[in-house]
Image (cartoon, rainbow, N blue to C red):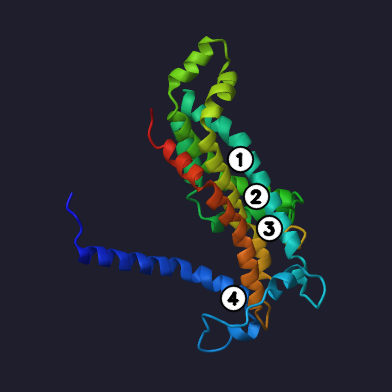
Amino acid sequence: MKKMTPTKKLIGYILMIIVAIWILAPIYWLVISSLSTQASLLIKPIDWFPDNLTFKNYTNIFSTQNGSSKSAEMFTTALYNSVYVSFFVTLVSLILGIPAAYSFSRLDFKGRRIGMLTMIATRMIPVVSLIIPIYILINNIGLLDKKITLVFVYLSFTLPFVIYIMTGFFKSIPMELEDSARIDGCSRIGALIRVILPLSGPGIASVAIFSFLLAWDQFFYALILTNSYASKTVPVAITEFTGRHAVNYTAMTTGGVLAAIPPMIIVIIFQRLIIKGLTAGSVKG
């Protein structure tokens, strides 16, 4: 392999710096905006390094005093709703998705290939084309504006993801290990619990994390299917800071930072596990 010349190395470093700035600049501005005042955000030219930073926006967004807006008062409820919905979406996706993935990877039944392709094809249907029949159905059965409704609707895109990824992961586990357990007296379910699942820890962790993040970031369904603060999630609550005649930029950016913290913490802590889980199922054997 030829060594890179100093000129090529310099060009590579410059390109990496440009990409890093391109990625990190919006995050930096989001954080700085959340620590600034409304007036300082409206001045021109933009002050990228403001002198007077304050944490008042973070106290106001959770405060029920000092004339805080109704949307700011309910932001804590929205955070709870997001955690509630994301947690149960992840839990149900694993409970239903792991047995289904095991069936697709280990059992030979009629229509297995068509079933897998059909399930994957559902992820290609535009959300906009589904929202009207979903809204009518949910409204007719009286489950509109309920957190549990969001859980069931979110399963429509998290469950196929879990099944698809875990199917590939189960295929990467040698069949001989399961056969040995069956010879020793384990049933198929026993072999799944005692042999397959312990070896599938990284894959299960990765799909659980991604399912949580998919549910946490979902905006469109939550916007259409919720009306009150009792069931609105964080992405929808952030939009409430936009009024008819004014926009509370500092509250929006503060809410954005708070909404980004849980996914960032999860990714930073479990990044190695996520990579291991998603790549382990890519090669069989």
Q: Amino acid at mark 1?
A: Ser
Q: Nearer the viewer, mark 1 or mark 3?
A: 1
What residue do we see at 38% from left, 66% from top? 19
Q: Which mark is residue 218?
A: none
Mark 1 or mark 2: which comes first in sequence?
2
Q: Which mark is residue 93?
A: 1
Q: Which mark is residue 225?
A: 3
Q: Nearer the viewer, mark 2 or mark 4?
A: 4
Mark 2 — residue? 86
Q: Position of residue 257 (x, y in %)?
A: 61, 66
Would you place residue 268 above or below residue 62 in this image?
above
Whether tag 2 and tag 4 are in contact, CB under 8 A, the answer is no
Mark 2 or mark 4: which comes first in sequence?
4
Q: Amino acid at mark 4?
A: Ser
Can you name the residue that lies furthest to the bottom here? Answer: 44
Crowd around label 3: few <14 · some 14–19 · many ≥20 (10 Å): many
Q: Nearer the viewer, mark 1 or mark 4?
A: 4
What residue do we see at 31% from left, 68% from top? 14
Mark 3 or mark 2: which comes first in sequence?
2
Residues 160 and 249: in front is 249
- Calculate the distance from the C-alpha at mark 3 to the C-alpha at mark 2: 16 Å
Q: Position of residue 33 (x, y in %)?
A: 59, 76
| Left or right of residue 135, residue 167 in this image | left
Would you place residue 20 above or below residue 140 in this image?
below
Q: Secondary structure at mark 3?
A: helix
- Calculate the distance from the C-alpha at mark 3 to the C-alpha at mark 4: 30 Å
Q: Secondary structure at mark 2?
A: helix
Mark 1 or mark 4: which comes first in sequence?
4
Q: Position of residue 203 (x, y in %)?
A: 51, 37
Mark 4 — residue? 33
Q: Amino acid at mark 3?
A: Leu
